[in-house]
Image: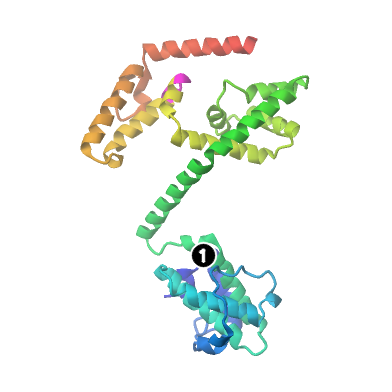
Amino acid sequence: MDPYRDTVPDDRGEEIRARVRERDGSDSEGRPAKRARANTSALLPSDGDRQEEVEEPPKPEDDLAKYNRERLQKGLRYINQAAKRKITPRTQEFLELHKDAYKVALESEALEKASRAVVQAMDRVYYSAAFFFKPRSSQEHEHLMQYVKLRRLELLANYGDYLGQELQEIRADLKAAAAGASSEVRKAAFELGPPKTWLTIADELAGADVADLRKHVYVACGVLGIDPNHMVWLIGEWAERNRIFHNQIRQYISECRWFRLAEQICRDLKELLNVAPDPDTAANYEKVLLSIQNEYFDVVDRDDPDAWYPNEKARKMGVEKAAREKNRAQK
């Protein structure tokens, strides 16, 4: 096993291996040479000096000169304490390498630059979030991806309302700025204003023909002094939050987005047994989904949303919506 490859994220592993080879030399196969491990207690001040516990990992130093003896001892004390906690096997393996790097640096009489460079590189790995997301197997990778997905949902749940609030403020500021402004600004305010939803705008921005809409976004951002990349991100993130936590089905119906509605219901029907807690719950949800399907579609193939055709009721709703939008545009 190559400990650097198995415990260090890919973009950092080679850097550390190079630093270690520079410090220790290489074996016949080009791998970092092995060296004896030092006794940690001999490298730290005695217990009588009452050294404070180091609860958080020391932040990586930006300058090798800052890795003086006091800083190295602080890092080693943290690793000694962290190794006693409940940590994953991979973290334990990495801490052994990390600890060795600190000990080698402290052993060198002149605190040689190569030894401190290894410590700095490993500090950067341990301090980065990426360190905690390197899977050891396909099963662990699947678990990590599920965890990332849950954390993504948590971010959207916790901060989604703030995204919407910011977009509301942008829309209000744009409306005020458009009064008495050039036709270009008024057009941007119109295209980014109600009743068009941010979800609709996000879908249009993700489509193939987005040049005009993106131009309106840039015009609006220029007037308001906003970073356009941030606004595009805001729109996309808010739309994602709405897709997950808002009532998508009702919105699809009100906007006559029949293919989106068909895609969603078709997918949910297929996955009911996987996501419902028990067969009875799945059966009850199936009744609800089929009732919506029957209300708005003539279905040729239940498993293919392309074969779900808007029925007479849905087509009538579409005509009425188009008439409302035409009247709005003429005002």
Q: Nearer the viewer, residue 280 or 137?
A: 280
Task: Decide: is 257 above or below 35.
Answer: above
- Badge 1 amino acid: Asp
Q: Could you tell me which quadrant the N terminus lies in?
A: bottom left
Identify the residue at horizontal 69%, vertical 27% (top origin). Answer: 174
Q: Residues within 10 Å of mark 1 (few under 14, many from 20)?
A: some
Identify the residue at horizontal 46%, vertical 24% (top origin). Answer: 251
Q: Nearer the viewer, residue 152 or 1?
A: 152
Give the percent coordinates (x, y) of residue 103. 55, 84
Q: Is residue 228 left or right of residue 145?
A: right
Boundaries of the magenta span: 254-259
The residue under label 1 is 10
Task: Decide: is 58 above or below 225.
Answer: below
Occupied quadrant, residue 69: bottom right
Identify the residue at horizontal 52%, vertical 34% (top origin). Answer: 239
Task: Decide: is 318 above or below 249.
Answer: above
Q: Nearer the viewer, residue 175 or 52?
A: 52
Give the percent coordinates (x, y) of residue 122. 56, 72
Give the percent coordinates (x, y) of residue 91. 45, 69
Q: Could you tell me which quadrant the C terminus lies in?
A: top right
Is 257 magenta? The answer is: yes
Occupied quadrant, residue 284: top left
The kind of secondary structure element at disc 1 is helix
Q: Is residue 25 visible?
A: no
Q: Is residue 230 visible?
A: yes
Identify the residue at horizontal 49%, vertical 87% (top origin). Answer: 37
Q: Is residue 281 left or right of residue 111?
A: left
- Check the image and tell me how it is coloured: rainbow
Task: Decide: is 157 above or below 60.
Answer: above
Give the percent coordinates (x, y) of residue 178. 73, 23
Please tell me how many numbered marks the rendered image carries. Answer: 1
